Image (tube, rainbow, N blue to C red):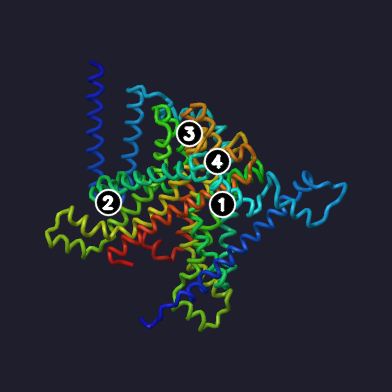
Amino acid sequence: MNGTLFWLGMAGALALAVFSVIRIAALENRWSGLCTAGLFGLWVLFFWEVLVRALEVPRVLLPAPSLILGSMAEHAPKLWGDFVQTVGKAVLIGWALGCGLGFGVAVAIDRMPFLQRGLLPVASLTSAIPLVGVAPIAVMWFGFEWPSKAAVVVLMTFFPMLVSTLAGLKAAGKLERELMYSYAASYPRTLLALRLPAALPFIFGALKVNATLALIGAIVAEFFGSPTQGLGFRISTESARMNMPLVWGAIVVAAVTGSVVYAVLVALERRAAFWHPSVREG
Amino acid sequence: MAKATPSRAQVWWHQGLPVAVVLLAVLLLWYLAAWVLNAPGAIERVLDADVGYTWQELFTATMSMERPLMPAPHQVVLDFYESLTEWPLDSPRNLLYHVAVTGESTLLGFAMGTALGLVLSVLIVHSRTLDRALLPWIVASQTVPVLAIAPIVLVILGSLGFSGVAPKAVIAMYLCFFPVTVAMVQGLRSPQKIETEMMHTYAASRWQALWLLRLPAALPFLFPALRVGVAAGLVGAMVAELPTGAQAGLGAKLLTGSYYGQTVQIWSALVMSAFLGLALTAMVAAVERVVLRHRGGV
């Protein structure tokens, strides 16, 4: 009897969920898009929680969201340590170094078309190569601590930045270049005043892509061997111990980090490249 | 058409020479790195410090160490070649065996992920609700290291009794799925308003508009996403081979190599996975060329 009532209630809730999402999606105003996605997410969480409890799904398969949150709260110091180890050290340093090197090399070979023609095809091809595979070698060279992860991240982020910056430096229009030329502007002046600003959208594009790549690189590199801390270490060891709520917790930390970094970069881009059409329209 | 098409030799001179120079420089740097990095180990293990040694002896010692910190290129090439020629195809010592294992799960996952992405993007383009409820999440997933949930997928599928190729293919699938969906939604929406209105005046049904206008217009968006997807799928398949203690596959080969300190084997497995990645991407690019030529574009 209780069972029937429960399933009737679930059917009602499902109908309500579908109806509410469709209604909000049909609204014509600024916030409709955001609200629909948010509401949809909330409903998914609701059904996840209720169904996992009602059907008594084993924790190993799928822990309820409340269980994940509880586990995150319980192991907060541990997860904070993992966050500092992986994001604060490996990702941040590797990302900054990799992007800085890529940018530096691109600017340095800006006046050497021969090297550009040689490096660009090679750099573009690296996107097809599973570069994370160097993790075991990095561990052998730099040890189990964060430098080996940062090295993998440097390697993964270097090439996208190089390719994007080279493309960006070619982005300034012919008219503008000729204007600079008619002002008798020197090479560095043209670079600083025209070509680098014109390259900003490309550079930010690479920074954003690289932020995700850096997280992936650091986490996967920790799967290959790590100290007793780090998000990737937590994910691989706790999933081996079948402590799935904590694994999900570590993934939530990684996902939130990725989204926040992306949002910060978008905000920075809006300030730095405020004049660019893609920013002005959005 | 004022520009004369350059001859083959000119193209080679213009493109091939710089690439060749860069590759040669990489090779030289590699040798240099092997020498510098291996020197301390060689002095300690191979050469006798009391007797003394010449530079030539040090150099030859660093080039042919048993377990070097950095194997010299010719050592990797030799190991690579030996593994391909001296062992039968079904032996785990042969790298092609691991390529087959990893490639199979990558391709299977790639096919499934692409199919799923195509279906979902068509649904999203035709449903306002799905567009607003689902698409933001799929786009947001691009900023999240989704590869991190691979161990969870392995545990879930493992406890449901799936093993072998299925879990790896599932991981490759969801990694391919996200970029394909995002790009296809963009591509299916790329036709100009005037073109969709023309389909409307022809009284074309939604299916006809999809088949005759939207899908062909989306193809240039699809293929870059497929290249990204197949590369991501390969990484996914290799990562999926790590925690299970799998015996086969390039990821497992890398891991066992690092367990036993077989650096030369790690490097040749790495080179092999680079070749596999390039081959998969080249395959997608070849399909792209055929399809887009057929379409009359490019």
User: Which amino acid lies under the numbered mark 1 shown in the image of this protein?
Assistant: Trp
Measure how far apart labels 2 and 4 are at the Cα level: 62 Å
- Same-subunit check for callouts 3 and 2: yes
Q: Residues within 10 Å of mark 4 (few under 14, many from 20)?
A: some
Q: Give the residue at mark 2.
A: A29
User: Which amino acid lies under the numbered mark 3 shown in the image of this protein?
Assistant: Gly
Q: Give the residue at mark 4.
A: B93
Front position among marks 3 and 2: 3
- x, y percent for residue B155: 45, 30
User: Which amino acid lies under the numbered mark 4 shown in the image of this protein?
Assistant: Arg
Task: Give the residue displayed 46% in from the left and 43% down from the top.
Answer: B102
> Disc 1, disc 2: CB below 8 Å?
no
Task: Give the residue displayed 18% in from the left and 52% down from the top.
Answer: B207
Measure how far apart labels 4 and 3 are at the Cα level: 39 Å
Indicate whether B229 appears above or below A77.
below
Indicate whether B67 appears above or below B77.
above
Label 4 residue SS = loop
Task: Give whichever of discs 1 and 3 has the lower sequence position.
Answer: 1
Q: Give the residue at mark 1.
A: A95
Front position among marks 4 and 3: 4
Measure how far apart labels 1 and 2 are at the Cα level: 38 Å
Q: In this image, B260 relative to B275: left or right?
A: right
Measure how far apart labels 3 and 2 are at the Cα level: 35 Å
Q: In this image, B228 relative to A9: left or right?
A: right
Quadrant where the N terminus of chain B sits is bottom left
Of residues A170 and A241, the one nearer the viewer is A241
Task: Give whichever of discs 1 and 2 has the lower sequence position.
Answer: 2
> Disc 3, disc 2: CB below 8 Å?
no
Q: Label 2 is found on which chain of the structure?
A: A
